[in-house]
Amino acid sequence: EDQVTQSPEALRLQEGESSSLNCSYTVSGLRGLFWYRQDPGKGPEFLFTLYSAGEEKEKERLKATLTKKESFLHITAPKPEDSATYLCAVQAILTGGGNKLTFGTGTQLKVEL
Amino acid sequence: SAVISQKPSRDICQRGTSLTIQCQVDSQVTMMFWYRQQPGQSLTLIATANQGSEATYESGFVIDKFPISRPNLTFSTLTVSNMSPEDSSIYLCSGKYGTGGLDTQYFGPGTRLTVL
């Protein structure tokens, strides 16, 4: 069974204090790993897709990296508007295709002035 | 990204009743899905909504409890039947473009359901 574990559950940072969020996964053949941002009362907003170990993607203050067992979401010099819950999800390679995303429970990030 | 809307945005319902949630996507979306996000838990796929045929349900979810329709490419409904307080959750519609396995899924704003 595919599993995704995110840590820490919650993280409080001062503005400008860089940090990383972790997403550990076990899957029977990784097709893709996805990062989403979710603000309170809203649906998840897509950030990145990573396909293979060693891949990196960046968007503004966020950089996502991928190894064979985990992914990191690095946040550089965060601002209060980066406060949100960050979700990681994996999609497995399945015979006949498959669209199921298996999500972690997320990291709730709060960035304070 | 996909344009996905849901209604209602929230509702409070009595035990034993049913609620139908609507999802509208833009015409570029080819596949639609329904997820549940229970308090403190991860998003869980309920089913894939298939146009003009029965939905494909994930383990632990059954059609009698969560009937789903998709009468055309851009519209789907999820009904939560005979509700109990355990059904209190956020229900999310998602869609993706294309038919490739790796196409990104985009999510609607969600429907927050409280069952008393």
Image (spheres, coloured by chain):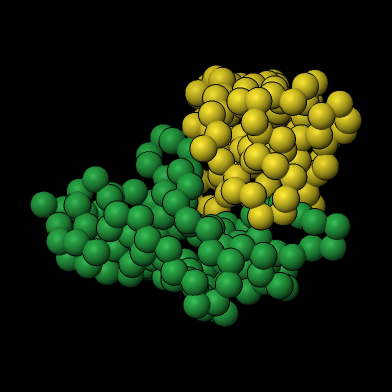
Split into 4 quadrants, where in the image is the N terminus of chain A?
A: bottom right
Q: Is residue B35 above or below residue A60?
A: above
Q: Is residue A30 above or below residue B45?
A: below
Please give the name of the residue rendered at 17% of the width and 65% of the height, measured from the top-left corner. A17
Q: Nearer the viewer, residue A78 or B28?
A: B28
Q: Position of residue B80 (x, y in %)?
A: 70, 29
Q: Nearer the viewer, residue B3 or B5?
A: B3
Q: How many marks?
A: 0
Q: Nearer the viewer, residue A42 or B27?
A: B27
Please give the name of the residue rendered at 74% of the width and 45% of the height, measured from the top-left corner. B99
Residue B11 horizontal side relative to residue A11, left or right: right
Q: Is residue B100 above or below residue A67?
A: above
Q: Position of residue A65 (x, y in %)?
A: 44, 71
Please give the name of the residue rendered at 76% of the width and 35% of the height, measured from the top-left corner. B49
Q: Which chain, by letter, is green? A: A
Q: Position of residue A61 (x, y in %)?
A: 28, 58
Q: Position of residue A38 (x, y in %)?
A: 42, 45
Give the color of chain B as drawn. Answer: yellow
Q: Is residue A88 visible?
A: yes
Residue A89 appears in which quarter of the rendering? bottom right
Q: Nearer the viewer, residue B45 or B12?
A: B45
Q: Is residue B90 visible?
A: no
Please give the name of the residue rendered at 22% of the width and 57% of the height, measured from the top-left corner. A78
